[in-house]
Image: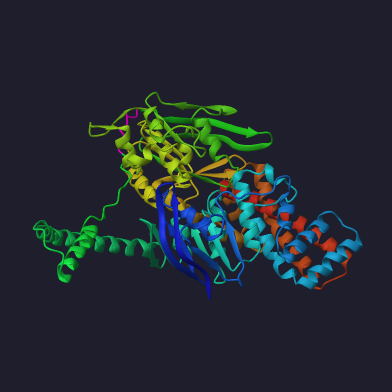
Amino acid sequence: MNYLTAENLSKNYGEKVLFDDLTFHINEGEKIALIAKNGTGKSSMIRVLVGEEKPEKGGKVLIHKEIRMAYLPQKPVFESEVSVLESFMQSDDPRLKTILEYEKAIDENADEKELQRVMSAMDNLQAWDIEAKVKKILSALKIHDLEQAVNSLSGGQQKRLALAKILISEPDFLILDEPTNHLDVDMIEWLEEFLQMPSISLFMVTHDRYFMENICNEIWELEGGTIYKYKGNYSNYLEKRAERKASEQATTDKAKNLLTKELDWMRRMPSARGTKAKARVDAFYQLEEVASKKTDEKQVELEVNMPRLGGKIAEFHNISKSYGDKHLIRSFSYKFIPGEKVGIVGKNGTGKSTLLNMMTGRDTPDTGKIVIGDTVKIGYYDQQNAHLSQTKKAIDVIREIADYIPLNNGKMLSAGQLMERFLFEPSQQYTYVSKLSGGEQRRLYLMTILMGNPNFIILDEPTNDLDVVTLQVLEDFLQDFKGCLIVVTHDRFFMDKMVDHIFVLEGEGVIKDFPGNYSQYRAFAENQLKESRKSTAIEVKETPKVEATQMKEKKKLSFKEKMEWEQLDKEIPEMEDKKKEIEKKMAAMPDYNTIKQLTESYDQLSKEVEQKTERWLALSELME
């Protein structure tokens, strides 16, 4: 079945042609990613497809009337003064409204009449079948407080809320603009698995290469106003694109050779009165167009004149940081060595940005101290583009730092020349920052950081809004960079290529140093989780007492922690058994008073199991 048809789409941005006269189809079962350089029209195309913007020159977008389509913009907009629950209640899906009414009735201990009403509605709409799915999606995207005001949520939380709403609505066809932005790695991997379902058809813009690799069966590239289509995932795209570029170069070279001969003929001014002569003249101009086609791709060339690092670089001496009762960092110590490349991973809210802000002096530890060497020059790329004035022209942003930039080879580059290396054409350099796309602003901001010649680079979510071409060249530069590097990113591909080891922020202030990249850490963590699930109360009992005692003697837990770990090891399996008993009772469909009590008990027990399991895992890792 054809889901979407685009006919003769054209779109300009001022005098710039983004795309012209494009026609394409998206069919059932296709999972397509659109790739393009920043500022070439990716988001504009999506806005045209969903009807937020109109195509020019009479273009059309036709969407099949019998399918459910959902759209996730980069920056979702919600009605002000509504709660998370009320935003869900605005859905067109009556099942979702009824499920949320049921959950609210349970939470608020509704009276018998109201509870009976919502349970009957659940029965009539067969909403019980998707209730578990709703809870799973809300849990995976960490949406727990349904009474919280939407306008009090951060931009990232609103993005997750918008994503949850469209996934819960069970659409046939999804259009997503940068869906992984503002998601932590756990959420991205869950979303990856969700979108792999055969029932979902998909068209998205993303820079996340692992995401494309694992989900997509087709990659489209928007280049020069034309769409090039590649069957397969991201790996296949790279291979086929290289073949296309080589073929284009060969065609151009051949055309240039022919053009030399034809040019000689044209200079003799042949009469174009005859049909053959006129055809040859027309062919000449077509040939000239092919021969003049540029096939070389501009790339970001980064050459930082890095000052030498001294013996002392950066040292953390027993630092701690808390906000109220929330402990982000506890007694953390570390000394950096030259050339070290470190990744920082952890769930949202565990203190990743706080650690970076303390290192750069934007924040201070509660206890302990941070010492930065005299020769260290930090370049800090944060998430906010805080240093870019929207009212200035792009080239003036650069000239404020320097008119000329020293390079490693002793040469100098003007601000304009440097901007060209960062893919800013001369005509674009005098554009106001406010007129640049999000990705172009991030690229400009990156340039202001690197041109300062740092020898210690800190990147906080550098991949957001950057196109794949820029990311690839940035990766090449950073791999050759001789200074120190710290990276916080949800982009697993970027992290894997960049880092030597990882600081893992586990929550409650615990930071562990893992010797490997992200994929290696993830495999290690999953293996540990599998092993922990195998540990049951029976296995503990079967362990010889002497052996168990000897094992505990080798661990670094306090006596109190050892007792706590042993108690949790017994309690968790028992609580899981209680949950199974409650599930059996609920399956028997008792009266409404009983099911209300059972639901409350089950929810409370689930929360306790989750809390105790997290504590058990934390203590177990201390025993390694």
Residue drawn at (37%, 65%) of the image: 236
Determine whether 16 is above or below 63 in the image. above
All told, the count of numbered labels is 0
Determine whether 5 is above or below 184 in the image. below
Residue drawn at (55%, 31%) of the image: 319
For residue 100, which quarter of the picture? bottom right
Is residue 304 located in the magenta-colored stretch of the structure?
yes
User: Where residue 207 sits: x, y (%)?
Assistant: 45, 53
Q: Which residues make up the magenta segment? A: 303-310
User: Where residue 288 sits: x, y (%)?
Assistant: 21, 58
User: Where residue 350 sits: x, y (%)?
Assistant: 59, 42
Q: Tell me if 505 is positioned left or right of 412 in this view.
A: right
User: Where residue 244 sits: x, y (%)?
Assistant: 29, 63
Q: Determine the residue located farthest toward the front in the rendered image.
A: 273
Residue drawn at (50%, 49%) of the image: 490
Q: Main secondary structure of the magenta part?
A: loop
Residue drawn at (41%, 62%) of the image: 21
